[in-house]
Amino acid sequence: MPRINNVLETALYVKDRVRSQSFYETVLGFRVLLDDGNRLTGMAVADTNQVLLLFDEGASTAGEKTSGGFIPPHDGHGPLHLAFAIDTASRADWTAHLQANGVAVESEVHPPLGGTSIYFRDPDDNLIELASPGIWETY
């Protein structure tokens, strides 16, 4: 079987892309790679090869014709979940940073394998997790 390297893009569907973009820039330090001014903002996750896509809810249900070809339709709604990896030593710094930005920590979980998961919500009520190593057998 050919090898998969990693998850490259993760998409969230948001009510107000400008508000969401500001949240992810300010609270998580992501950088804007693309803002098409229409339906999509692409953000660099910690300057890695991973990208968070913010789509306006309902704006991609017909697909999108681009100069490079047709992107098939997709959409999502309701509170979704995604997790970002953090270093174990930065857990307290992240908690303080979230508080300083007015972001309430909803829960903190210590899985049996080790590590810690910090859970909070973005402006669209998506559940965001900051996870330190040890939460999975593979991480």
Image (tube, rainbow, N blue to C red):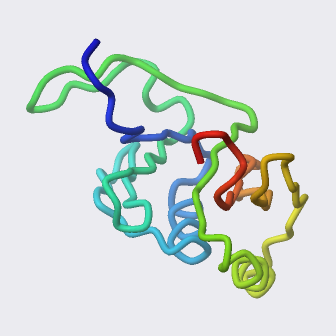
Name the residue rendered at 86%, 70% in the picture.
104
Looking at the image, the residue that sits furthest to the left is 67
Q: Nearer the viewer, residue 99 or 94?
A: 94
Q: Position of residue 76 (x, y in %)?
A: 60, 27
Side (left or right) of 60 relative to 56: left
Q: Nearer the viewer, residue 72 or 131?
A: 131
Side (left or right) of 99 relative to 25: right
Q: Count of labels shown?
A: 0
Name the residue rendered at 57%, 71% in the picture.
28
Above or below for 38 versus 43: above
Q: Nearer the viewer, residue 132 or 7?
A: 132
Above or below for 137 versus 89: above
Q: Position of residue 58 (x, y in %)?
A: 53, 29
Name the residue rendered at 13%, 23% in the picture.
69
User: The N terminus appears in which quarter of the rendering?
Assistant: top left
Name the residue rendered at 78%, 47% in the picture.
113
Task: Please tell me in which quadrant of the rendered image residue 101 appears.
Answer: bottom right
Above or below for 66 versus 84: above
Q: Position of residue 3 (x, y in %)?
A: 29, 25
Q: Position of residue 95 (x, y in %)?
A: 78, 77
